Image: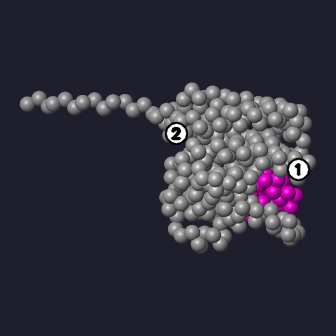
Amino acid sequence: MRPLHIALAVLVAAGWGVNFVVIELGLAHFPPLLFSALRFLVAALPAVFLVGRPTVAWKWIVGVGLSLGVAKFGLLFVGMDQGMPAGLSSLVLQVQAVFTALFAALFLSERPGGRRVLGMGIALAGIGVAAVDEGAGGPVPAFVLVVLAAACWGVSNVLTRKAAPRDSLNFMVWVSTVPVLPLLGLSLLFEGWDRDVEALAALDPTGAGTVVYVAWISTVLGFAAWGFLLRHHPASSVAPFTLLVPVFGMSSAALLLGEEVGPLRWCAAALLAGGVALTSLARPRPAVVPPVPEAREAAV
């Protein structure tokens, strides 16, 4: 990769890492499901009128919109609102690579090789260490919600792979249109009309800034830049830069939010980073296709 492209990859990883701190700040202004709905509303408008028609079938847009937008981000925002620290969230969410490999093996017939299985085991060990660390001083249900969010991210990754969008920006903008109404409905159901109206009425520049950041910097510009890198370089060259996301996430959370990073969390980070690296970089074995029997000559 050229130095400029390496710098862009690092910049995207930094933006995604800091995003967890911004989410933490935004949750002080909005209920989690409303905040997530606003994220996708601002990401979709007015961009949806500028990117042209969808380049993939609607079934893929709806599938990714529900699994990524509603399930993954809904669970993540609720988990963080329930007490999951921003830095730890950025770390635990990377187990999505393990879920992606599992779901790809189940639904795309991508047989994991020995290195990938080893990487999945190491990453899961890291999740175990992180769970012990969080269980010692934080709410375990919130931790579980973020792990479930990672699983939903794995589902959306498999659906995105099936969709194979030619234009990642176009795809992400149209995907962003799907979660808005479901998330608003869930917010009204579980968070209440009064709480939502109160949050919107009290909107200030800081709250608006968090929405703009998670919508445009993290979602639209981040995924557009990532798609640009994937179009110019092999995925195996680009994917490892996602390992920098928890580095920036944990560092920015420590600097800006005062989160403590103890020995157990560093151990979990090392295991997760190593496991995700093996899982992401190891190539899956091609599915074994049984040979087609030769046709016998018909008897005359």
> What segment carries the magenta color?
18-39
Dot label at residue 107: 2
The verdict on residue 26 being magenta is: yes
* Disc assigned to residue 284: none
Residue 186 seen in this snapshot: no
Q: Nearer the viewer, mark 2 or mark 1?
A: 1
Q: Which residue is mark 1?
A: 255
Q: What predominant SS class does the magenta segment belong to?
A: helix
Q: Secondary structure at mark 2?
A: helix
Determine the residue positioned at 77% across, 36% down: 269
Q: Is residue 178 above or below residue 133?
A: below
Compared to residue 197, the image places residue 65 above or below, namely: above
Q: Nearer the viewer, residue 275 or 153?
A: 275
Query: Measured from the top left, where is residue 79 in percent x and y?
Result: 79, 47
Q: Is residue 82 above or below residue 127?
A: below
Q: Is residue 281 visible?
A: yes
At label 1, counting other C-alpha atoms closer than 10 Å, the crowd grade (few under 14, some 14-19, many 20 or more) is few
Work out which quarter of the rendered image holds the C terminus and state it: top left
Q: CA distance from mark 2 to mark 1?
A: 41 Å
Q: Nearer the viewer, residue 152 or 47?
A: 47
Residue type, numbered disc 1: Leu
Q: What is the secondary structure assignment of the residue under circle 1? A: helix
Instruction: State the residue at coordinates (88%, 53%).
Output: 256
Does the stretch in magenta take in 130? no
Identify which residue is drawn at 50% across, 62% down.
Answer: 55
Question: With 287 as the anchor, is 88 left or right in this view?
Answer: right
Question: In front: 59, or 226?
Answer: 226
Q: Are marks 2 and 1 in contact (CB under 8 Å)?
A: no
Type of amino acid at the residue the image marks with label 2 = Phe
Snapshot quadrant of residue 15: bottom right
Indicate the position of residue 271 as horizontal and vertical percent values: 73, 32
